[in-house]
Image (cartoon, grey):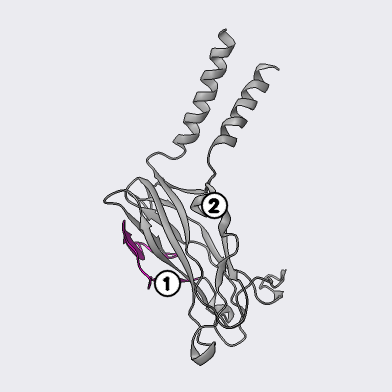
Amino acid sequence: MNNTSRLATGLGLVFLATPLIAQHGHLNSGALGKNQGDALSFLNGSNFASSSGYTKVLNGATTGNYAGFYEGGITFTSVHGLSGTDSQGIPYVADPNSAALGSFVQVGIVSVTGPAGGSFQFWEEGATSPTFNYTVGYNSGTPDLVALSDASNGAGTPGGDPFGHLHGRRFTTTTPGEYTVGFQLFDTSVNGAGGGPIQSPSDILTISFTAVPEPQTWALAATGAVVLGFLIRRRR
């Protein structure tokens, strides 16, 4: 094996051994069924759960609205319940695991754990300061809610598509460290029995976040370790 191959193999092994650290992803919401009282569900939540090894990295920002914060984003969506064509003429199809037609899906942060003195923030698209702020230790069964369904497309109306795919939202913290944040889905429509929601709340999904002082220092350290090991072996 030549030197280039050895280095490439070493780098590959390091990154395979490193816990999954993703910088962007779409967390899709739907339901376990469409009947009255069926629970909402994070359809691909197992890929984001803290138990999976997924960690969302929040990198330090020095300019713009997020200056002084560690920031990053996950795009939460609600999948289509109807088939059709979007404004650009691109067809889409209903997802069999969507929430019921007429439901309106929202998400709330129900718990935050992390370093002492830390806090965790949510920013709505276009916000110039945090929309919601949660100190470490926060735990609530009645959280602030953020719409995932898109009301401008008729979501929440009788028979309306619960779909939504909204970008530009961010999560931040002002304190570096490891955080675990609990998220839960709620249907806030009034199209169910007795003028209430159709779907019941989802199970809580916990996601790990890491606020790091310097972006990608973990990758630089890993690369340095591999290069050092390669050079030592070459000298022997």
Magenta region: 124-147
Nearer the camera: disc 2 or disc 1: 1
Q: Toward which corner of the image does residue 120 lie, by quadrant?
A: bottom left
The residue under label 1 is: 145
- The percent coordinates of residue 169 (x first, y second) are 46, 62
Quadrant of the frame with the N terminus: top right
Q: Residue at x 45, y 51 (%)?
A: 208
Q: Earlier in the sequence, mark 2 or mark 1?
A: 2
Q: Report the residue at 47% width, 67% height from top.
A: 184
Q: Is residue 44 above or below residue 99?
A: above
The quarter holding residue 42 reads bottom right
Image location (x, y in percent) of residue 137: 31, 58
By secondary structure, the bulk of the magenta-drawn segment is best described as: loop
Element on which disc 2 rests: loop
Q: Is residue 139 magenta?
A: yes
**Callout 2 environment at 10 Å: few (<14), some (14 to 19), or many (20+)?**
few
